[in-house]
Structure formats: structure tokens, C-alpha cells
Image (cartoon, grey):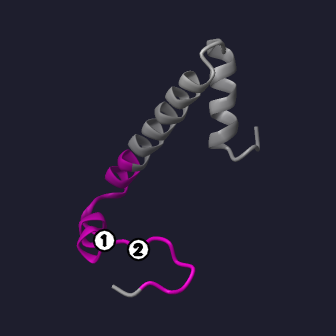
Amino acid sequence: MRLDQGQIEAVDPALADVLRRKSGAERLAIADGMFVFARQLIRSRLHVEHPEWDDPKLGAETARRLSHGAI
């Protein structure tokens, strides 16, 4: 599969076919699971980097990173 210059990702055609066959609810469930995983991953990394931070601080920084600074 040829990628255009600047393109950093591409969906495999077989995966695209599988996703097309899923219902909207199934695709939303997949997206939700990915979001939950990303939140857990960011929070875990922050906890390792800043063990002195309490839960509210970890939650606030996790939210800020997930929102790209909008929060």
C-alpha cells in the first residue's frame, strides 16, 4: 500500500471491511474502549512520572491532555 508523503497511517483494507460490517453501536463501543484505554494509559504514565500528585491532580492533567489543552 503506497502512502502519500506526509501520510502517517493507513487502514488496512481487510480491517476497513470488518469495521464497515459493524453496526453504529458496535463502532461506538470500540471507540469508547479505545478512549478508556487512552485515558488509563495517560493517567498511569503521569502517575509514574509524578508519584507525588494526588488523584484530583492526576485527573485534571489527564483530562487536559485528552482535550489537547481545551480544559
Q: What amino acid is labelled 1 in the image? A: Ala
- Left or right: 54 with respect to 44? right
Which one is nearer the viewer's eye here, 41 or 27?
41
User: Which residue does the numbered mark 2 point to in the structure image?
Assistant: 10
SS at badge 1: helix
SS at badge 2: loop
x, y percentage for residue 57?
69, 19
Q: Which residues are magenta?
A: 3-30
Magenta-colored stretch includes residue 22: yes
Magenta-colored stretch includes residue 14: yes
x, y percentage for residue 47?
56, 22
Q: Residue at x 47, y 35 (%)?
A: 41
Q: Residues within 10 Å of mark 2 (few under 14, many from 20)?
A: few
Q: Residue at x 59, y 26 (%)?
A: 49
Q: What amino acid is labelled 2 in the image? A: Ala
Of badges 1 and 2, nearer the viewer stands 2
Q: Residue at x 65, y 12 (%)?
A: 52
Q: Residue at x 68, y 30 (%)?
A: 61
- State which quarter of the image contains the C terminus: top right
Residue 16, numbered circle: 1
